[in-house]
Image: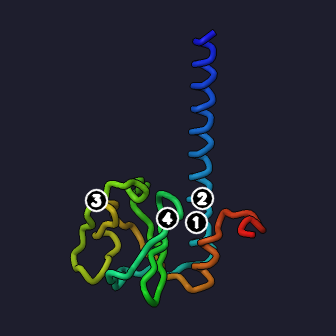
């Protein structure tokens, strides 16, 4: 009986993991589709300061906000280091800028940086939410 229970638990856990992976892939594809449809302009660098902050969209994308501007940052690979408590030091060519293709955030190398308007920022922050889910 206990072997059957363990087997059922293993099947359930693997199904949950597969479902979570599909949800992550859907979120990533939604962001990629948004970039393509909106034709977001790509930039080479961001002027940074100590008051900047970022928000995770999915393991491949973050929204990076400075005092005046917002950017969508894409990594070369899924950056799971974003959500861990262990902080990896950033590698930067210049302390006042973040460059695409050379610099890192939390140890993950930046692939592309896209400039965002206020409308883009608001839409990306709610991407994937069902209508009325914020009420």
N-terminal of the two: label 4 or label 1? 1
N-terminal of the two: label 4 or label 2? 2
Tell me residue 83's x, y (percent): 43, 56
Q: Secondary structure at mark 1?
A: helix
Q: CA distance from mark 1 to mark 2?
A: 6 Å
N-terminal of the two: label 3 or label 4? 4
Tell me residue 87's x, y (percent): 31, 59
In this rendering, the label closer to the viewer, 3 or 2: 3
N-terminal of the two: label 3 or label 1? 1
**Residue that numbered label 2 is attached to:** 27
Quarter-of-image position of residue 77: bottom left
Q: CA distance from mark 3 to mark 1?
A: 25 Å
In this rendering, the label closer to the viewer, 4 or 2: 4
* Tags 1 and 2 touching, CB below 8 Å: yes
Taking the spot 57% from the left edge, 72% from the top edge, the residue there is 35
**Residue that numbered label 3 is attached to:** 88
Horizontal side of residue 61 vs 23, given as left or right: left
Residue 56 is marked as 4
The N terminus lies in which quarter of the figure? Answer: top right
């Amino acid at each position: 009986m206990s072997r059957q229970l363990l087997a059922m638990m293993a099947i359930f856990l693997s199904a949950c993991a597969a479902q979570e992976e599909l949800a992550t892939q859907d979120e990533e594809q939604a962001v990629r589709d948004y970039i393509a449809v909106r034709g977001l302009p790509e930039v080479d660098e961001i002027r940074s300061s100590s008051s900047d902050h970022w928000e995770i969209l999915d393991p491949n994308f973050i929204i990076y906000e400075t005092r005046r501007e917002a950017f969508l940052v894409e990594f070369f690979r899924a950056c799971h280091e974003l959500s861990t408590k262990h902080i990896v030091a950033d590698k930067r060519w210049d302390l006042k800028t973040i460059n695409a293709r050379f610099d890192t955030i939390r140890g993950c190398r930046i692939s592309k940086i896209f400039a965002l308007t206020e409308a883009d920022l608001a839409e990306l922050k709610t991407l994937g939410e069902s209508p009325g889910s914020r009420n």
